[in-house]
Image (spheres, grey):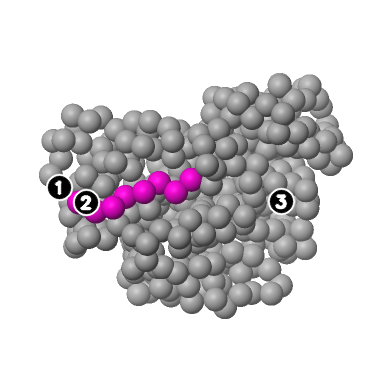
Amino acid sequence: MLRLLPLLLLSLAAAQPMVMPLMDNPTQDTVDHWLQQMLDLAESNPELLAKELAGSPAAAIAPEMNSTAVLELVPTPTNGIPTVVAHGMGDSCFNPGMKSITEAIGTKTGAYSVCVPTGATQILDTINGFLKNMDDSIDLFAKKIQADPKLANGFNAAGFSQGNSLIRGYINKYNNPPVKSFLSVHGTVMGVGGVPQCNPSGLLSPICATLAKLCGTFGYTKLVQNHLFQADYFRDPTKLTDASYKSSQLAVLNNEGDSPNPDYKSNFGKTSQFVMVKALKDTMVFPNEGEHWGTFADGSFKQVLTMKETSVYKSDSFGLKTADEAGKISFETTAGNHLQFTEQELFGWIAKYWTA
């Protein structure tokens, strides 16, 4: 299994054989070289790369809505408040699942609904979900939102998997126009401390924790942080005091770095509601408690903390504790794996939280 490190380390499983031979004991140079090959392939054959990324076990593709089931659901009007939707890694706003979700939300809420891509086509949107770094993706996401006059007075936001990192980042960095209610479905909002399909605190912990630690070793370099979205929200609990982590894009959003930005905290406070949905059997996001603002304990890949036990909550570094004490944070769960939810569940959350 260690021979799969390049694929697990960078969460680009199926694309890996196209670019780099399987190898043991990778070094920073080999990882950087492999990433550069990925960037070169994005230029020379983007169609092939997008296909491989979308077919990867690391891809989080939203399910297509059942039109009959959607028709049977009662309308959930939101008093004209529009909705912004954001997709997961390997997915695209142009794919059937995300298109059907966006259209169904618009139909049932009776308001404008739009999926905001970070690429102009299905191919570019898929590739950018991996090879456009998180910070640049957030900035482009914000630019598109601010250019849409239908969103000028604020909006509700629904994120799926990695798309929640976009929305959470938008809230911290911009929130103008403001997100009124944030529905995070199986989101990477607190970052991840493991690689997909390999739980560092599970039965394969000797292997998976080692792989996770290698992600921390290789994931915080300038080249990787500048290009790989998934590395930008990797939170290695053993490196939280290291300069390498503190300068990472996730640490900056969390105000865990050496120069906290007070605007990130005040912007977070402008959102009135956070609805956090956790998949109880998630095998993509580790720990899955991260979908409820939890994380691994400082220094440990085994102990999992709930939101209130985390250091970022206790320090209120970006406003999480303030939001919770104001009654803004609600928790929901689904019984199955990552992005396994029903039409009834999705529109049940919308009816419960967006139509009150």
Residue identified by numbered label 1: 75
Q: Nearer the viewer, residue 309 or 28?
A: 28
Q: Position of residue 55 (x, y in %)?
A: 54, 24
Say whether disc 3 or disc 1 marks the residue closer to the N-terminus: 1
Q: Nearer the viewer, residue 204 or 313?
A: 313
Helix, strand or loop at label 2? It is: helix
Say whether disc 3 or disc 2 marks the residue closer to the N-terminus: 2
Indicate which disc residue 225 carries. 3
Helix, strand or loop at label 3? It is: helix
Residue visible at 68% across and 30% down? 7
Q: CA distance from mark 3 to mark 2?
A: 38 Å
Residue visible at 40% across and 46% down? 115
Amino acid bearing label 1: Pro
Instruction: Decide if residue 351 is on the left or right side of residue 182.
Output: left
Q: CA distance from mark 3 to mark 1?
A: 43 Å
Instruction: Please identify the quadrant where the N terminus is shown.
Output: top right
Indicate which disc residue 356 carries. none
Instruction: Decide if residue 157 is on the left or right side of residue 199.
Output: left
Instruction: Decide if residue 322 is on the left or right side of residue 49.
Output: left
Classed neighbour count for the residue bearing mark 2: other residues with Cα under 10 Å, few (<14), some (14–19), many (≥20): many
The residue range painted magenta reads: 109-117
Instruction: Decide if residue 86 is on the left or right side of residue 238.
Output: left
Q: CA distance from mark 1 to mark 2?
A: 6 Å
Q: Position of residue 300 (x, y in %)?
A: 64, 52
